[in-house]
Amino acid sequence: MTTRIDTRFAALKKQRRSGFITFVMAGDPDPATSLDILKALPKAGADIIEIGMPFTDPMADGPAIQAAGLRALKAGMTLKKTLAMVRGFRKDDNATPLVLMGYYNPIYIYGVDKFLIDAKSAGVDGLIIVDLPPEEDTELCLPAMKAGLNFIRLATPTTDDKRLPAVLSNTSGFVYYVSITGITGSASADSTAVGEAVARIKRHTKLPVCVGFGIRTPEAARAIAEHADGAVVGTALVDALRGSLDSDGRATGGTVDAVAGLAAALAQGVRGAKQAAE
């Protein structure tokens, strides 16, 4: 079964360019503004959008994304409302792939079977669940794939050749390579090291390899895009959003534009990359 993610990467391959993948937190700073941001991202050049599912204990996230999750929870965001937001986005856009990213706990509480049915019908294409290792594939990964959703796995600098096959075994859509050890937003990605890591992963899989964590500027996005099939930016966009809020943490007239403007600049960076020879 072909998903929107597969279709998008096939199109990118034809265009001989890397994809630009954006991350935003669902419901940050409030559900209505969050949906407006989501709708603005494809026009700004996002090829794929990751949507964070707010959670009270986001252990892999740095301060910026943790704060975004807390703002969203404070604004009343729930997993049910996140799926409603996806449905709202799909009214006008049936092409841009959407990936829900987060932790297993909210899905477990929602009920796995119900969640997969609702996510699929809302228009979700894939899942990135950072705290479910391959050993737990029967919990969510295998049911998700059966439901027609891509299950996207993270590989890190510490994922050695012995561990890689397990990480890749039931992965689909793309492989998300975390370019640094540590939490999101904590360091900058080294494009040379990333190039070597991407090449190593590609020896084990035919899936596209996208790189995230530590990409904050159009120049950094461009450098990563020269080695990878996609560059993922989250913290920088979340920081741009936070910087646009008023003193009470509420959205202003400039909030959507702050995020979309940075996304457009980053997209230009990605599109300016010369793809490494196949």
Image (tube, rainbow, N blue to C red):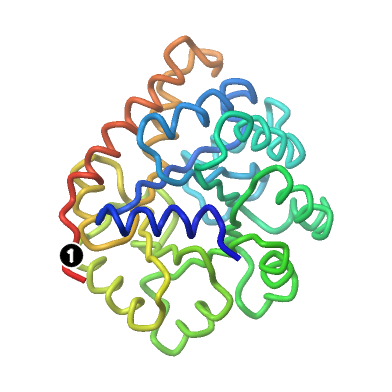
Compared across the picture, whether 215 is left or right of 160 comes to left
Residue lying at 75% horizontally and 56% vertically, measured from the top left: 116
Which one is nearer the viewer's eye here, 259 or 179? 259
- Position of residue 184 relative to residue 28, above or below, is below
Please identify the quarter of the rendering in which residue 51 is found.
Answer: top right
Which one is nearer the viewer's eye here, 50 or 8? 8
- Position of residue 99 relative to residue 177, above or below, is above
Residue lying at 69% horizontally and 59% vertically, measured from the top left: 104
* Quadrant location of the C terminus in the rendered image: bottom left
Mark 1 neighbour density, 10 Å: few (under 14) some (14–19) many (20 or more): few
Number of numbered callouts drawn: 1
* Quadrant location of the N terminus in the rendered image: bottom right
Which one is nearer the viewer's eye here, 219 or 183? 219
Compared across the picture, whether 65 is left or right of 109 comes to left
Residue lying at 70% horizontally and 72% vertically, measured from the top left: 142
List x then y, in percent, for residue 128: 57, 58
List x then y, in percent, for residue 143: 74, 68
List x then y, in percent, for residue 77: 70, 32
Q: Amino acid at mark 1?
A: Ala
What residue is pinned by disc 1? 276
